[in-house]
Image (cartoon, helix red, strand yellow):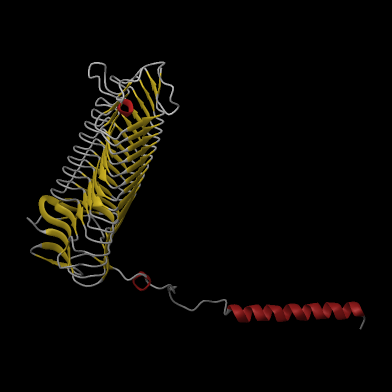
Amino acid sequence: MNRETVFVTLCVCATIVTSAAIVSHAGPLSPPAGPVASTAKPLGEIEPRVAINAVNTPGTIGTAFLISEPGSYYLTGNVSVTNGFASGITVISNDVTIDLNGFTLEGNGSSGDGIFANFAQPRNITVRNGTVRGFNNGIRLRTDSINGRLEDLLVENNSAIGAQVGFDFSVRDCVFRDNGTTGFSARSRLSLKDSSFISNAVTGVSGENDSTVVNCIAHSSGGDDFRFFGTTIFNNCQSVAAGLEGFDLGERCQLINCTAFDSFFDGFSAQRSVFQNCVTNGCGADGFDAELCTLSNCNATENLGVGFRLSNCTLLGSLAQENVGGGIVASGSNISGCTVSNNSSMAAALPGISAMGTCFVHRNIVFDNGGEGIVATGGGNSIVQNSLRGDSAVNNSGSSTVADGLITNPWANFVN
């Protein structure tokens, strides 16, 4: 047998062995008799969930549905509650998730609460993905509730509060609008992001302390748009056309890249807080009303009151322009590197900067205001190295009006 014959024989044998191995591994080519059955796990084993209905979550005279056990629950369709003052879904257990599943839970306008936690200190309750409207309170998880979540919700047209929660809640991608009192109310340690509060009759959103509010907008509230007691960080938040104040805040807040437009009263009101790159425009009273605050790179324009009303504050690198009540009114404050122009009117003749005692007014550019550029009253003011054009400075460091061409002190103000 020559070498060519041996090689061909070996190749044929190898092919036969390989084919046999493949057939052995793959199993029989003919399937068993009968219908094909799925080998996948059912959804109930992957994510155990319970449909909200009269069988699984039967209600009472006071509620359409009652959830009494921990677990994950979901709607299978829209629900209308027409039974007098009944609530929609009442929860009497901790550790409950309610997925509205894109559907609407709707009351009759005089119903109880849309979703109600009816026991003390409820914990770990989540509501997501749907609409709640037409109840007394849309979502009432009690003010003593702890550690829950609201996500992807539209809560609207409820006669009292849109949603009320307690401590340590996370709220994302929600809209609260046209509710009869407050759009959304929380206690402390709230994490609030990417949500809107529109045309609520009293307050847009309210909270207490130690919270974070990011990328939120409040519009056309009957009262304040944002109302927090203090110790809260606001980043990239916007108030528009508040019925009272845009941001009505307590102490120790931080505001970054926030705006307040067209508030009926003040745009921002706070104590012992920090403002960075914040803007107010068109408010009916003062742009900023601040006490013991630091403000940097902020703008106050076209407000009917004062641009910046400051008590014991530091104002740096900011703009006060075209405010009817004057640019800056301050006591005990440091005002440095600011531009103050076109404030007041010739008829009102109010100054660009009013330093009302113990102020340090340094290196500001002041021009074309209705009255004097800088007026110092009281004692202990230091007004140096400011540039004034078309204005004058009155009572500069205790002297009389600063006049053109009479200043030789390099620390004095420049008037031209």
Where's residue 255, x and y in %? 34, 45
Residue drawn at (13%, 59%), measured in percent from left and top? 87
Q: Which of the 4 image quarters holds residue 411?
A: top left
Give the position of the N terminus as an image quadrant.
bottom right
Q: Quadrant of residue 88?
A: bottom left
Q: Residue at x 9, y 62 (%)?
A: 62
**Outermost residue, right side:** 2
Please identify the quarter of the rendering in which residue 67 is found.
Answer: bottom left
Residue situated in front as seen by the camera: 309 or 362: 362
Residue furthest bottom as drawn: 1
Q: Nearer the viewer, residue 179 or 100?
A: 179
Question: Quadrant where the C terminus lies?
Answer: top left
Q: Residue at x 19, y 38 (%)?
A: 244
Q: Horizontal and vertical percent for residue 241?
A: 24, 35
Q: Position of residue 384 (x, y in %)?
A: 39, 30
387 horizontally vs 25: left or right: left
- Is residue 100 shown above or below 285? below
Foreground of the two, 294 or 359:
359
- Label count reads 0
Q: Let me know if residue 173 appears in the view.
A: no
**Residue 105 location, x and y as percent?**
20, 54
The answer, for residue 403, to whether it is visible in the render is yes
